[in-house]
Image (spheres, rainbow, N blue to C red):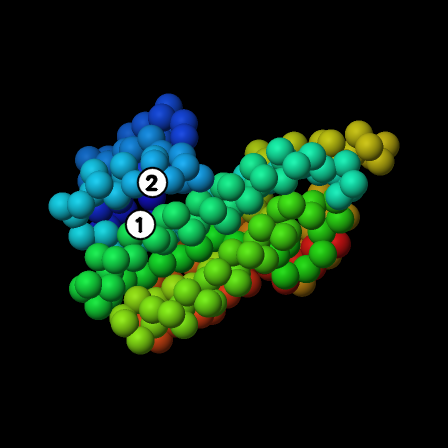
Amino acid sequence: MALAGGGARVVLTGRQRVTLDAVAEEIGPNVRVATVDTSAEGSVAALAESLAGEQVSILVNNAGVAGPVAPLTDVSVDDWDEVFAVNVRGVFLMCRAFLPPMLARGEGDIINLASVSGKRPLARRTPYTASKMAVIGLTTTLAHEVGHLGVAVNSLSPGPVSGPRMERNFAREAARAGTTPAAAEAEFVGRSAMKRMVTEAEVAAAVLGMLAMPGLTAADIDLSAGMVAR
């Protein structure tokens, strides 16, 4: 929505068409929608083929799954593989599909959504944290591969983002600890320098800000209100 507001012609992709259509309706006419599973090579290839006549100059890889919350010894192979399929292979497939035209033109921007949890420990979340560390590693290495060819590759690492997902987490933590959701939230945000979470609007503004910095590449931007994940 922020990119469209800034004048970009946006292509929304994801697995749930009803969600995509709802966002597209909010954006207005300057948007296309495509149902895509970014972890599936054929699905990504079909998307790239459908956009072959378009100039894709900005790629934001923000598809991701949270994965299980459990000790590593209780994580199934299937759960581990699903997290890496979406969070890492999806980024690889999308970059591989849309980089060639950018390289041919000598310009382009790729922003991969990582996480502050990819840089600091987060107990009982080994698949997620490992996948986000992998995204940061992919980003910095790819940036050095293509930077001299005119394509900038960066990652954005948000901390916890306020909204329904975190509200559910606070409710679960309150039930586990025998306290209230408000108390669970207060304890959680107390770990951050700003004593709060970040917002969706701040994440969007960070993406726009990164795109406005032509010398930025191989960087990971921490947008976490000073959060330390423990």
CB within 8 Å, label 1 to label 2? yes
Decide if residue 64 is on the left or right side of residue 122. Answer: left
Q: Which residue lies furthest to the top in this view?
A: 18
Question: Of residues 30 and 57, which is closer to you in this image?
Answer: 57
Report the quarter where the C terminus lies: bottom right
- The residue singled out by tag 2 in the image is 44
Q: Can residue 206 be seen in this view?
A: yes
Residue 220 versus residue 169 in the image, above or below: below
Residue 92, image x, y percentages: 42, 51
**Helix or strand or loop: what does disc 1 sit on?**
helix
- The residue singled out by tag 1 in the image is 97
| Label 1 or label 2, whichever comes before in sequence order | 2
Residue type (three-letter) at the residue carrying disc 2: Val
Q: Can residue 115 be seen in this view?
A: no
Residue 80, image x, y percentages: 63, 40
Residue type (three-letter) at the residue carrying disc 1: Ala
| Residue appearing at x 67%, y 63% in the figure | 193
Give the Cα distance between marks 1 and 2: 7 Å
**Helix or strand or loop: what does disc 2 sit on?**
helix
